[in-house]
Structures are given as structure tokens and as C-alpha cells.
Image: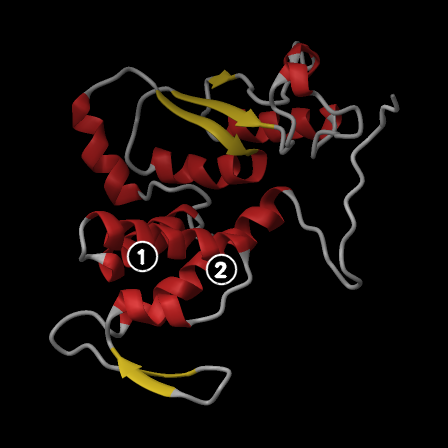
Amino acid sequence: MTYLTGQQVIILKEGTERSRDRDARRSNMMAAQIISEVLKTTLGPRGMDKMLIDSLGDISITSDGATILNEIDVQHPAAKMLIEVAKTQDDEVGDGTTTAVLLAGELLKKAGDPQAGWPVDADELEALLPIGGDVVTIFHSDIEDTTKAIPIVKSKWAGPIAVYPEAGRRDYVYNLADPRETNKYSIEEWVQFARNWVSEGVQIIGGCCGIGVEYIEALRGKL
């Protein structure tokens, strides 16, 4: 009996590009938002019809979201997932496919908003503050996004601010740690970011998902 061992080999077509981390997330968000934009103008009493031409040259005109998504040819995995959301909605409810796609598209658009770098803006933060709490924590955000978020928090919150950024890695779980993966920033760069955060009023600094003990220990006596 013969056993095949070793690493899995994946064969890709010539010209295939591989993206990861933030670039992959942005690509997925953009693909899903494009599907959402296709359907946006069909919604409501002033919604417009779409003219669809298939590979055989047959023409169909419709404003029905389920029909449009069923006819268009999509290759991107994230876009396909959004179409599956619409199909599931149609199978289970029989209506609301366009709404489901638009809602998912807007949520992804909000999550990827480059202005804030995180999915909560100043107005939404102000609405959350009355719930109560002693500290506002910016948690599980990229180091650069954490830096962008601090002024937004300060504009609405006068109390203590804590930051727990992540290292920009894929192998967040320890037992899946990949020795080929490295943190996006060195310890020296981390210390400089931390100094800047303290100068902006941050009082608590921790870390998650790749920011290990060595990063926290490096802050001793340097802030």
C-alpha cells in the first residue's frame, strides 16, 4: 500500500495573482459592492430595468433582482457568495433578494470605509456612549487603523481610552502558527506607535492576534 505524504500542491492557471491580508479583504469587499451596485438602480418605484444579453445573443429586460443575479456571469468568489445570499433569500422567502444584496453591500462598504479605518464613525460612537462604561477600547484593529480611530474617539469621549491592536497576521490562533508569517511591524516600530498613542491621550495599551508578550515588555520604560 502506498501513502502520499507532504505538503498539498495547488496548481493555478498562468497569470494567477495571489492576494492576502488587507489586500484580500479589500478585494472581497469591492467585488461584493460591485454586485450591490448592479442592483441598486432597480430598487423602488423609480427602479430601472436592466438589459441582459447572454452568450447566445438572447436579450432579456428585467428589474427583478433574482433574475439579474441568475443571468450574470461572475467569477470572483466573494461576489459568488453574495449571489448565493440572494438565492437563499429567494428560496426561503420568495422575495427580498435585491434588499438582501444591497444590505450586505452597504455593510461591507461601511466596514471598509477608509475615512475612519473602522466600522464606527463619530456620530455612531456618540449614540453608544449613553449605554455606559468607564473606558472606550479600540480592539482587534490594524495598528494604522487604531491610529486613525483615536481622534474619532477623543472627539466624543473625555474618559480613558484603551487600544488593543492586532499584528496584521493570518495565523492568529497559536496552534495554527505559521513560521513563515511575520508581524507587519517590528518591535521598534510598535514602540514608536505606542509613544504616539500615549501623546494623544491613550492610557491603556495591550495587544491581540500576534502582539505577543515581547511587544508588551518592550514598552517598559519607553513610554
- Residue 20 visible at all: yes
**Upstream in the sequence, badge 2 or badge 1?**
2
Residue appearing at x 36%, y 66% in the figure: 69
- What is the quadrant of residue 189 in the picture? top right
Report the side of 150 relative to 155 (left or right): right
- What is the quadrant of residue 82 in the picture? bottom left
Q: Amino acid at mark 1?
A: Val
Task: Give the quadrant of the C terminus.
Answer: top right
Residue 223's label in the rendered image is: none
Residue appearing at x 48%, y 41% in the figure: 148
- What is the quadrant of residue 216 in the picture? top right
Labels 2 and 1 touching (C-beta < 8 A): no
SS category of the residue bearing label 1: helix
Residue 101's label in the rendered image is: 1
Task: Give the quadrant of the N terminus.
Answer: top right
Residue 31's label in the rendered image is: 2
